[in-house]
């Protein structure tokens, strides 16, 4: 494969992956606590044949190396639901799953049939003591303090675990807005949580739609180049075959 075609295909491949990232951001723009993602690229530049001048034409091979998460906070949205909890500032809720503890910023909690505080997917929310929360049938006045202490008219039940990580980019996204990592979490000494509110997605729909249009146009432009290069190669092969005949 000639260098121009290889370079063009490298760009087309990265654009397709970037489109997947943008589409995922748009699909989750209404997901509580969702953090948008961006792709990171590197370019390998070489002088084109005959480009001996200092600022001559260069060939750029593009390669995507990672996906970076935007860790900025999303807007707080008031819901009035006493089981909705938003974290202000640093921190993640600790969620118990079959694969071990996971972490999330999505504080849309509920009670299951057994009175246990769980996520929308049914995974238990853990206290700072590593235990789930259970409410009695008569617990009607559920209150969650700013430090995460959960209480009812019958007394305190414990404090919701809020943890942080030295490098949040090590968190890997999973299903249901959960993150998993092998890194050891650190308890947040003074968590700041708000009852009756949720942290919205930090996705800005207008910007993401503009990015999608930009990526789509760039992809079409590269596609056109590849098609023209393919036509050129076919013409060259046809002309050579006619000369040899």
Image: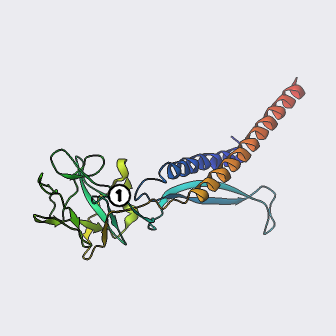
Nearer to us in this view, 80 or 30: 80
Residue 139 at what x, y percent from top left? 14, 57
* Rendered position, 149 above or below 230: below
Display coloring: rainbow
> Which residue position holds label 1?
106
Residue 161 at what x, y percent from top left? 23, 65
Residue 11 at what x, y percent from top left? 65, 50
Q: Quadrant of the C terminus?
A: top right
**Does the image show residue 81?**
yes
Q: Is residue 58 left or right of residue 107?
A: right
Residue ID at (25%, 46%): 122
Residue ID at (43%, 53%): 31
* Rendered position, 243 above or below 127: above
Q: Is residue 83 left or right of residue 55?
A: left
How packed is label 1: few (under 14 Cα within 10 Å), some, or many (20 or more)? many
In which image quadrant can residue 194 be found?
Answer: bottom left
In which image quadrant can residue 208 be found?
Answer: bottom right
In which image quadrant can residue 49 be found?
Answer: bottom right
Nearer to us in this view, 74 or 150: 150
Residue ID at (84%, 28%): 238
Q: Is residue 114 left or right of residue 237?
A: left
């Amino acid at each position: 494969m000639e260098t121009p075609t290889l370079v063009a295909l490298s760009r087309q491949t990265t654009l397709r992956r970037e489109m997947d990232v943008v589409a995922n951001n748009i699909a989750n723009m209404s997901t509580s606590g969702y953090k948008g993602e961006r792709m990171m690229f590197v370019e390998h530049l070489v002088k084109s044949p005959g480009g001996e001048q200092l600022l001559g034409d260069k060939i750029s091979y593009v390669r995507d190396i990672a996906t970076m998460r935007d860790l900025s906070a999303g807007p707080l949205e008031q819901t009035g639901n006493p089981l909705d909890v938003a974290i202000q500032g640093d921190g993640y809720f600790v969620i118990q799953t079959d694969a071990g503890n996971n972490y999330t910023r999505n504080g849309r909690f509920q009670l299951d049939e057994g009175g246990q505080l769980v996520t929308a997917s049914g995974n238990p929310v853990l206290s700072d003591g590593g235990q789930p929360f259970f409410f009695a049938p008569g617990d009607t006045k559920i209150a969650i303090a700013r430090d995460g202490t959960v209480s009812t008219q019958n007394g305190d039940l414990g404090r919701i675990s809020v943890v942080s990580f030295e490098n949040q980019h090590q968190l890997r996204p999973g299903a249901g807005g959960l993150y998993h990592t092998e890194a050891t979490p650190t308890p947040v000494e003074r968590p700041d949580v708000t009852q009756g509110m949720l942290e919205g997605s930090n996705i800005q729909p207008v910007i993401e739609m503009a990015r999608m249009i930009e990526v789509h146009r760039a992809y079409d432009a590269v596609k056109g180049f590849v098609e023209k290069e393919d036509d050129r190669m076919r013409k060259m092969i046809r002309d050579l075959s006619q000369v040899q005949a």
